[in-house]
Image (spheres, rainbow, N blue to C red):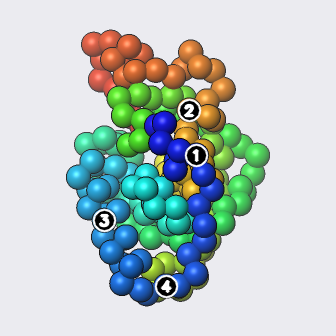
């Protein structure tokens, strides 16, 4: 947090299946795996392209989370399926050691392209929907603290939850 690249709108990917895109995706996968993340956006590693990856199976940061399939989502489009909002705790690899209570759409449809340029669409809810929204926010220069409604529900993990296990990050 504080890097100006995280506050800029990313540009769309125009060419798929290139060695450069493959290298970016490998770098993102390696970074996400190293940090036990649920997802990662290209701007988080300094690349201003509309590319996110996400996926959760067994992850120590999300012990109770439902599985989210490993996904490459390029040039995403998100559409809420209702006005229903859920507030849950989020953390971020770009804001280490902190959590905040963040409102997100509960159900949404997302569409975009995979690394080969094949368009796909999914309808999701709950944790999966939250992960997609969090990562796609990065593509528009939005960090999760910007979405927090009550700053009393944002802070350092050890101050918010002294002597406790951290709540599940949604």
Residue beneath the point at 66% across and 61% down: 78
Circle 1 SS class: helix
Q: Position of residue 13 (x, y in %)?
A: 56, 75
Asked if residue 124 shows in the view, the reply is no
Which of marks 1 and 4 precedes in the sequence? 1
Which of marks 4 and 3 precedes in the sequence? 4
Q: Are marks 3 and 2 in contact (CB under 8 Å)?
A: no
Residue beneath the point at 54% across and 20% down: 153
Label 2 Cα neighbours within 10 Å, binned few <14 / some 14-19 / many ≥20: many
Label 3 Cα neighbours within 10 Å, binned few <14 / some 14-19 / many ≥20: some
Query: Which quadrant would residue 99 be assigned to in this image?
Result: top left
Label 1 Cα neighbours within 10 Å, binned few <14 / some 14-19 / many ≥20: some
Q: Label 4 belongs to which residue?
A: 16
Q: Which label lies toward us, 1 or 2?
A: 1
- CA gap between label 1 and label 2 equals 12 Å
Looking at the picture, tell me which residue is in the foreground, 43 or 40.
43
| For residue 109, side relative to residue 16 (left or right) | right
Against 92, is 89 above or below? above
Circle 3 SS class: helix
Give the label on residue 25, or none: none
Circle 2 SS class: helix
Q: Label 3 belongs to which residue?
A: 27
Q: Position of residue 126 (x, y in %)?
A: 54, 48
Which of marks 2 and 1 precedes in the sequence? 1
Q: Label 2 belongs to which residue?
A: 145
| For residue 137, side relative to residue 32 (left or right) | right
């Amino acid at each position: 947090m504080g890097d100006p690249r995280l506050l800029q709108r990313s540009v769309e990917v125009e060419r798929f299946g290139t060695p450069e895109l493959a290298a970016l995706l490998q770098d993102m996968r390696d970074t996400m795996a190293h940090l036990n993340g649920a997802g990662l956006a290209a701007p988080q590693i300094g690349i201003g392209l509309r590319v996110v990856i996400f996926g959760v199976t067994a992850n120590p940061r999300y012990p109770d989370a439902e599985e989210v399939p490993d996904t490459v989502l390029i040039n995403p489009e998100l559409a809420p399926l209702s006005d229903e909002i859920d507030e849950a705790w989020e953390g971020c690899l770009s804001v280490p050691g902190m959590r905040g209570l963040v409102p997100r759409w509960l159900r949404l449809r997302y569409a975009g392209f995979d690394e080969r340029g094949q368009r796909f669409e999914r309808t999701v809810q709950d944790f999966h929907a939250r992960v997609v929204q969090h990562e796609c926010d990065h593509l528009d220069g939005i960090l999760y603290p910007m979405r927090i409604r009550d700053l009393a529900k944002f802070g350092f993990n050890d101050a918010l939850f002294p002597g406790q296990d951290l709540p599940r990050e949604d």
